Image (tube, rainbow, N blue to C red):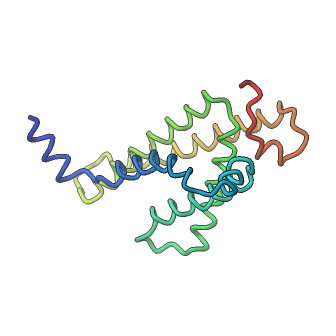
Amino acid sequence: MYNNIVKLYMGTISKGPVFLFVLTLIANFLFYLFSCDLRQLFNYNIHIKWIVGYFVLFFVVFLGNYQGNKTMKYLAFISIFYYIWIIALMKVHPYIFFLVMTILSIGFMTDLYVEHHSNNPENHHLKRYEKIHEISNYLALFITLVAFIYYYIHSDKSNINDILFNTKCEKM
């Protein structure tokens, strides 16, 4: 049994996501290689954090569509859309955040299933999984928008900059 698991891991499962996840965890420790001035800029300037975050997101979107025929203009637009969604998602209640992430995970897994089995013409469940993927994306976006509007209406912040970019934790 152990041999079969090792063969499965070594032969069919992509090691890219594991590598990227570990690299992401390690990257947190590399922060201290920056100069003190640069670390202070990253620590205390929320706008710089959001700009760097956008470029990281754009990079991820670009990598995800690298072999596609998408234009840079399209990828930039999609990245901006996703980034606005992420900013809104960062402002919702933590339970809503985890609900949306669970829904997106379900959509992601169904998309992987469809992609993996799309060459099998006898698989009659593909349409159902494609629909689940589509519905999960719309549902996650809808829940995020409703929760963000609720946050916006009940926020005591005075301007949009404070609402979108303020990350101070009053409860801590």
Q: Is residue 117 above or below residue 149?
A: below
Nearer to us in this view, 18 or 14: 18
How far across and down, in percent of the image, does residue 154 sit? 83, 30
**Where is residue 57, by image quadrant?**
bottom right
Nearer to us in this view, 73 or 5: 5
Nearer to us in this view, 31 or 115: 31
Name the side, left or right, on which 38 lies relative to 116.
right
Name the side, left or right, on which 51 lies relative to 149.
left
Residue displayed at 66% across by 54% down: 36
Residue sticking out furthest to the top: 171
Residue displayed at 70% across by 38% down: 91
How far across and down, in percent of the image, does residue 167 sit? 73, 40
How far across and down, in percent of the image, does residue 143 sit? 64, 37
How far across and down, in percent of the image, does residue 96 sit? 62, 31
Where the N terminus falls, by quadrant? Answer: top left
Q: Is residue 97 above or below residue 6?
A: above
Residue sticking out furthest to the right: 158
Q: Is residue 126 above or below residue 171?
A: below
Where the C terminus falls, by quadrant? Answer: top right
What is the count of numbered marks? 0
